[in-house]
């Protein structure tokens, strides 16, 4: 493989004195003039000098970007806030391939009230460009919007019929069909005037915007007044409206203080992708949820990712959609400029914060958990898609120079706990899909380091390839004339076309030695390093760099993650088994008491630090047994 260029600087590198120290926005272009990357800086000279450092010191993907580029240009702006706006505009205009790319273009359903109409109506729509409309959501499913509308119009009966039905009803003086069956409360139902209907619409919007307590208190007071006046029919109407309000509110629990309007962003990421879980909180309740998936081309920090997410979320958002608070997992470097930018757009102060404690921190944990699950689902779906799988295997064949597509791939990972309880895992993918029935785990009693562990495990696995197949054992016919066949435990069906190890150059070289020692050098080999997602081949000085959007890289990452998960699972089972074995050696301590001890103290480490008196506090464990447990653990 060719090594990266070793020249001291790039041909288009500006002289140090030519780059201003002002804030601004810069663009890298290729030889055809296409914009490759857009970035902003408080100090252009300081930021751009990072890209023109010695090439060997650059991140692999940054190196690829600057060597692909043929020129760099910049625009100086008066303030850091202006650089935010210009960066957003240029990213939107040029869609640079090395900036983060938003993959999830799913259109979520919204509830919209067409305030620009003579008689506004409530609709379900995915179109966010209706002139004069007020939007609520997004909602995860269409049915959720319809259910909410059905409940809301019981309390605030506004128009639901189409524009054609409305015009016909107003022209003929006959109620629209939804109005006749009680599904439309607009002027077209002939029950209210246009002015009266507008008041109800305003109340509808106010309630959905978070003013639910005012309406709940007002309806409760009216119901009591009607009941006191023995107007039970009116009291029943108010009661039904309160029930509908409770049902709407029950769909969205109060997660923060009732006066809280905030947007909360949970983010999960790995080296290739990120998922963003956006919770829209109004009046202390989650009024909308949106999930977005991002492909990362360059290696960017969590704070830089938050910066990009906020720009994209609020760049074209109406002022009414920008909340008082924005809660994020990492504070961007230019948080103050982002706050000023949002303040200018909203017309009121906006704060960007990291939730540290209390209910906001708990909600952030929930958002981050949802983001992690969404990231896992995204990777799984991408790996299991037939077209993507086929493309992944083809790309992998080309990238690694294989003679055929690797239909069977085995991936190995080593896991340990501070050098103890060393275990290894083998996961198998066939045709791009996991074959969990063929996963294997290995215990490694003695080893010097990870490379020795990899060598040991592969020698043990490769030894099976040279063993003759064991025939099925056939039992003599039974009394009823049937023949029972007992098959041996399934063995490794056939040699893999590709072995993958979790690690970089040292791990790959250790695996290559195992292949040579076992006489199976015909099997292809590669390693994938965690931090930079580099693909290493044996005997090569530099790694293979697959594009961040490569299906082959996603497949390798999925293999590596699955092997790591399986190794950790096996290690934890061993630790639990070892712990149970140690405690089982205590006379008089059975399974039930062992479980009770571990459940109460949480871990053996905590149990070891407990005094005999504290152990004896558990039901069923007396002072003598507690002393035995304490003394036994003290010798371990």
Image (cartoon, helix red, strand yellow):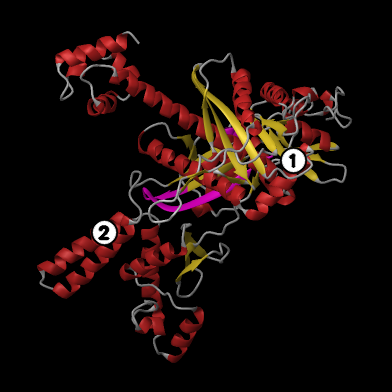
Would you say 436 lies left or right of 96 here? Answer: left
The quarter of the picture where the C terminus appears is: top left
Segment tinted magenta in the rendering: 279-304
Using a 10 Å C-alpha cutoff, classify the residue at mark 1 as few (fewer than 14 neighbours), some (14 to 19) or many (20 or more): many
- The residue wearing badge 1 is 37
The quarter of the picture where the N terminus appears is: top right
Residue 622 locus on image (x, y percent): 14, 18
Would you say 69 lies left or right of 247 here? Answer: right
Mark 2, mark 1: which one is toward the viewer?
1
Q: Tell which residue pokes out farthest to the bottom in this image.
A: 172
Would you say 567 lies left or right of 480 here? Answer: right
SS at circle 2: helix
How far apart are the two marked residues, 2 and 1, measured between alpha carbons?
52 Å
Q: Which residue lies at the image location 42% right of the left edge and 56% below the top edge? A: 481
- The residue wearing badge 2 is 216
Q: Depth check: give the residue in front, 420 or 254.
A: 420
Residue 510 locus on image (x, y percent): 68, 21
């Amino acid at each position: 493989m060719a090594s990266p260029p070793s020249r001291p600087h790039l041909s288009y590198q500006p002289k140090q004195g030519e780059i201003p120290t002002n804030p601004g926005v810069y663009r890298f272009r290729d030889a055809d003039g296409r914009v490759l990357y857009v970035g902003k800086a408080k100090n252009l000279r300081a930021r751009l000098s990072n890209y023109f450092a010695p090439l060997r010191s650059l991140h692999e993907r940054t190196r690829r970007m600057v060597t692909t580029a043929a020129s760099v240009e910049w625009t100086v702006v008066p303030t850091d806030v202006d650089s935010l706006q210009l960066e957003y505009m240029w990213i939107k205009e040029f869609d640079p391939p090395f900036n983060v790319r938003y993959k999830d273009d799913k259109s979520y359903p919204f509830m919209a009230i067409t305030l620009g109409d003579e008689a506004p109506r409530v609709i379900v729509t995915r179109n966010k460009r209706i002139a004069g409309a007020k939007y609520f959501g997004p909602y995860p499913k269409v049915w959720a919007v319809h259910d909410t509308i059905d409940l809301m119009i019981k309390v605030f009966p506004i128009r639901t019929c189409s524009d054609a039905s409305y015009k016909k009803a107003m022209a003929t003086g006959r109620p629209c069909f939804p109005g006749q069956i009680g599904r439309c409360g607009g002027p077209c139902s002939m029950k209210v005037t246009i002015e009266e209907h507008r008041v109800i619409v305003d109340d509808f919007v106010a309630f959905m915007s978070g003013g639910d307590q005012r309406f709940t208190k007002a309806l409760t007071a009216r119901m009591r007044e009607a009941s006191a006046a023995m107007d039970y029919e009116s009291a029943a109407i108010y009661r039904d409206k309160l029930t509908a309000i409770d049902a709407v509110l029950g769909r969205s629990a109060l997660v923060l203080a009732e006066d809280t309007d905030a947007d909360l962003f949970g983010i999960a990421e790995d080296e290739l992708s990120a998922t963003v879980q956006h919770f829209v909180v109004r009046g202390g309740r989650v009024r909308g949820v949106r999930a977005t998936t991002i492909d990362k081309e360059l290696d960017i920090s969590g704070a830089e990712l938050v910066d990009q997410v906020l720009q994209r979320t609020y760049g074209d958002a109406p002022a009414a959609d920008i909340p008082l608070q924005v809660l994020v997992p990492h504070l961007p470097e230019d948080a103050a400029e982002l706050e000023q930018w949002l303040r200018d757009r909203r017309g009121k102060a906006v704060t960007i914060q990291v939730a540290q404690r209390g209910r906001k921190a708990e909600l952030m944990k929930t958002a981050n958990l949802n983001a992690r699950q969404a990231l896992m689902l995204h990777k799984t779906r991408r790996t299991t898609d037939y077209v993507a799988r086929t493309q992944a295997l083809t790309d992998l064949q080309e990238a690694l120079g294989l003679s055929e597509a690797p239909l069977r791939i085995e991936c190995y990972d080593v896991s340990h706990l501070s050098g103890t309880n060393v275990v290894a895992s083998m996961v198998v993918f066939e045709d791009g899909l996991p074959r969990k029935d063929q996963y294997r785990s290995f215990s490694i009693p003695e080893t010097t380091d990870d490379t020795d562990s990899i060598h040991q495990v592969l020698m043990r696995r490769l030894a099976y390839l040279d063993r003759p197949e064991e025939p099925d054992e056939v039992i003599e016919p039974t009394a009823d004339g049937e023949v029972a066949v007992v098959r041996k435990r399934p063995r490794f069906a056939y040699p893999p076309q590709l072995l993958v190890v979790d690690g970089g150059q040292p791990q790959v070289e250790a695996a290559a030695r195992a292949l040579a020692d076992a006489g199976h050098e015909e099997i292809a080999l590669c390693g994938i390093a965690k931090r930079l997602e580099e693909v290493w081949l044996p005997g090569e000085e530099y790694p293979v760099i697959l594009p961040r959007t490569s299906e082959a890289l996603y497949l390798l990452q999925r293999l590596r993650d699955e092997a790591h998960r399986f190794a950790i699972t096996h290690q934890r089972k061993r630790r639990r088994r070892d712990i149970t074995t140690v405690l089982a050696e205590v006379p008089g301590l059975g399974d039930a008491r062992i479980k009770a001890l571990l459940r109460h103290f949480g871990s053996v480490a905590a149990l070891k630090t407990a005094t005999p008196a504290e152990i004896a506090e558990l039901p069923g464990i007396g002072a003598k047994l507690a002393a035995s447990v304490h003394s036994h653990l003290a010798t371990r």
